[in-house]
Image: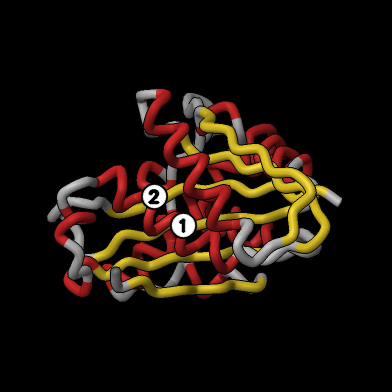
Amino acid sequence: MQYHMFIDESGDLGKQSNHFVIAALIVKDPALLDRIIKNMRRNKFKKKLKNAQEIKANKSSPDIIKYMLNQLNAIPETRVCYIVLKKEKLYSNYLLNDKHKLYNYVAGKLAEHVILQDADLLVRIDKSKGKQMLRDDFNRYFERKVNENSNLRKIEIHHSYSHAWNGLQFADVLAWSKFQKVEHENSEFMDVLNVKKEVYPVWG
């Protein structure tokens, strides 16, 4: 059995927001996500998405975001995991002074809660780390953390461009929607999502 995990974040690790959110979308068949986006581009949102290379929540209309979230409800065995960092609770100066280490730490907390048994896991994360050294550092840390509670046969981690992977565009929408709820107390988007949601706070 193979699972596909798509990871993206919303907020920042500096001082521009009070929260930082990482979302992980876990599905068995990513082709179902491709089918949704393909249908949106060909039919329902043909005009709105005509010149959009990819769907980004912060550049999309509410009806596009809600449509995507609602479509996830129909995909069997869809799982959404969130890590929410409330930055004022973070006490580690070591992490605060190194955004790459802080990102890995928060993502690692998410990985600890992803429990999969006797399965392969293919992870795609939005390519934000420019240096290969930083990507390798993340990969080692995330793999170690996810294996603490899971029994995986195999894990692959890829840092990919979101315009090339529809699953990453869904992860962007999920992270943005959760950020609206925790940062702005706006739950109109999260209220649309009825799939299994797991939310974990991290205080550092």
Q: Secondary structure at mark 1?
A: helix
What is the number of the mark on residue 104? 2
User: Do the CB atoms of the residues marked 2 and 1 lie less than 8 Å apart?
Assistant: yes
Relative image position of residue 13 (x, y in whole percent): 23, 52
Give the image quarter of residue 118. Answer: bottom right
How far, Cα to Cα, is label 2 from label 1? 6 Å
Q: Nearer the viewer, residue 31 or 105?
A: 105
Image check: 146 left or right of 35?
Answer: left
Q: Classify the position of the C terminus by image quarter.
A: bottom left
What is the number of the mark on residue 88? none
Relative image position of residue 89 (x, y in whole percent): 21, 74
Q: Amino acid at mark 2?
A: Asn
Q: Amino acid at mark 1?
A: Gly
Q: Residue at x 71, y 47 (%)?
A: 121
Q: Residue at x 30, y 73 (%)?
A: 203
Give the image quarter of residue 46. Answer: top right
Here the colouring is secondary structure
Q: Residue at x 65, y 73 (%)?
A: 196
Visible in this render: residue 192? Answer: yes
Query: Crowdedness of circle 1 by 10 Å Cα count: few (<14), some, many (20+)?
Result: many
Q: Nearer the viewer, residue 76 or 85?
A: 85
Q: Nearer the viewer, residue 97 or 167?
A: 97
Image check: 105 left or right of 197?
Answer: left
Visible in this render: residue 67? Answer: no
The answer to whether 33 is drawn above or below residue 88 in the figure is above
Relative image position of residue 56 (x, y in whole percent): 44, 41
Total marks drawn? 2
Q: Secondary structure at mark 2?
A: helix
Image check: 97 left or right of 133?
Answer: left
Residue tagged 1: 108
Relative image position of residue 15 (x, y in whole percent): 13, 55
Q: Residue at x 31, y 59 (%)?
A: 20
